[in-house]
């Protein structure tokens, strides 16, 4: 969602660039803090995948629509809430964190946003939420993000089955980054990903792009379809993460990672902006993040006062 610091007259490309840049720099900052020993626990960054979070979530109505995310949730959270302060305090275990500093990087809950690190666990919860919202007649679309590796969890298919059989307003977004931790999905996935949803009579669209505006257009159409037909929809987004699975665990071929950098979503959208505008967006974002880091570092450790 647009930051209060972003001027109203910003183009869509500028707004999307600002949102993706914030996610990118937020997560790079987290990795730097881990290396400096300022953070403990774990974290999974979506560096390289930001266009999915920003493009899809910008097509939702934050007041009524609901988002469920997974272990790799920072980008989804920031795109939905524009709350780097709450997230940083949360990851650092500080008072003022989204969940009081108790949930950490993977377990976030704020308003209509929920995430959980147990692979696949959030899909039945999202399906139940979609049922509840349909019964309430709220018109809300429930969106659930999952990775290609999570397609190995049987519950995903139970949910696809019920979402289709019961006509639930559920958008399933599969972010296919071709890996589950260190395992290439080609070793574990038979058939095609879209055909898995199609087998349950779920309308499906498959995109191989890191252009945030293309993803946004597809998401707008998918969400309009879910809202109007009150039927599930599955969006399969091919993507790539430049960062390790978590902090340092990466066994992928370096040449493969480098080749993918030409499709960096920040490069693609940044190239659409006049340089001065792009640099100004970056400057504002850096200043904001610097403030947030200082704020979080000065905040009380959660529970310390008790
Ligand atoms: C039930 C369960 N098993 C194992 C894990 C450990 N784990 C965390 S992420 C992950 C791989 C997930 O792959 P994918 O769904 O493709 O998402 P990606 O990490 O690529 O975004 C694994 C095995 C877990 N969180 N939950
Ligand atoms: Mg994956």
Image (cartoon, grey):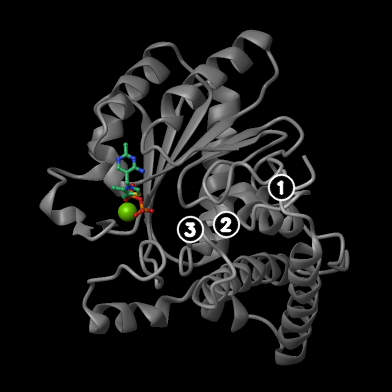
Quadrant location of the C terminus in the rendered image: top right
Separation of marks 1 and 3 at Cα, in angstroms: 18 Å
Indicate the position of residue 38 as horizontal and vertical percent values: 59, 70
Which residue occupies the foreground of this view, 247 or 79? 247
Apparent side of residue 68 relative to residue 296 in the rendered image (left or right) = left
| Residue, disc 2 | 75
Q: Is residue 84 above or below residue 104?
A: below
**Is label 1's Cβ within 8 Å of ligand 1?**
no
Secondary structure, mark 1, is loop
Apparent side of residue 145 relative to residue 81 in the rendered image (left or right) = left
Nearer to us: label 2 or label 3 = 3
Nearer to us: label 1 or label 3 = 1
Q: Residue 157 is drawn in which quadrant?
A: top left
| Residue, disc 1 | 302
Q: Residue at x 45, y 26 (%)?
A: 232
| Residue, disc 3 | 43
Secondary structure, mark 2, is helix
**Is label 3's Cβ within 8 Å of ligand 1?**
no
Which residue occupies the foreground of this view, 11 or 4? 4
């Amino acid at each position: 969602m647009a930051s209060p610091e972003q001027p109203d007259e910003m183009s869509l490309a500028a707004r999307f660039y600002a949102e993706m840049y914030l996610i990118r720099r937020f997560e790079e900052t987290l990795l730097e803090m881990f290396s400096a020993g300022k953070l403990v626990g774990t974290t999974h960054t979506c560096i390289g995948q930001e266009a999915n979070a920003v493009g899809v979530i910008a097509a939702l109505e934050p007041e009524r629509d609901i988002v469920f995310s997974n272990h790799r949730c920072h980008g989804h959270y920031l795109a939905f809430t524009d709350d780097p302060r709450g997230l940083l305090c949360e990851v650092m275990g500080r008072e003022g964190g989204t969940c009081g500093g108790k949930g950490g990087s993977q377990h976030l809950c704020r308003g209509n946003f929920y995430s959980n690190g147990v692979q696949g666990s959030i899909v039945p919860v999202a399906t139940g939420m979609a049922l509840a919202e349909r019964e309430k007649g709220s018109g809300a679309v429930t969106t659930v993000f999952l990775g290609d590796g999570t397609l190995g969890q049987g519950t995903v298919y139970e949910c696809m089955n019920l979402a289709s059989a019961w006509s639930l307003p559920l958008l399933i977004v599969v972010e296919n980054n071709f890996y589950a931790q260190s395992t290439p999905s080609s070793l574990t996935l038979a058939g095609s990903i879209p055909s898995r949803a199609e087998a349950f009579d779920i309308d499906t669209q498959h995109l191989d792009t890191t252009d945030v505006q293309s993803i946004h257009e597809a998401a707008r159409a998918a969400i309009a379809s879910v809202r109007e037909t009150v039927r599930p929809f599955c969006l399969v987004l091919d993507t790539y993460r430049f960062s390790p699975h978590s902090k340092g665990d990466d066994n992928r071929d370096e040449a493969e990672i480098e080749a993918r950098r030409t499709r960096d979503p920040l490069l693609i959208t940044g190239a659409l902006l006049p340089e001065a505008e792009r640099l100004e967006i970056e400057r504002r974002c850096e200043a904001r993040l610097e403030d947030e880091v200082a704020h979080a570092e000065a905040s009380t450790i959660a529970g310390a006062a008790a």
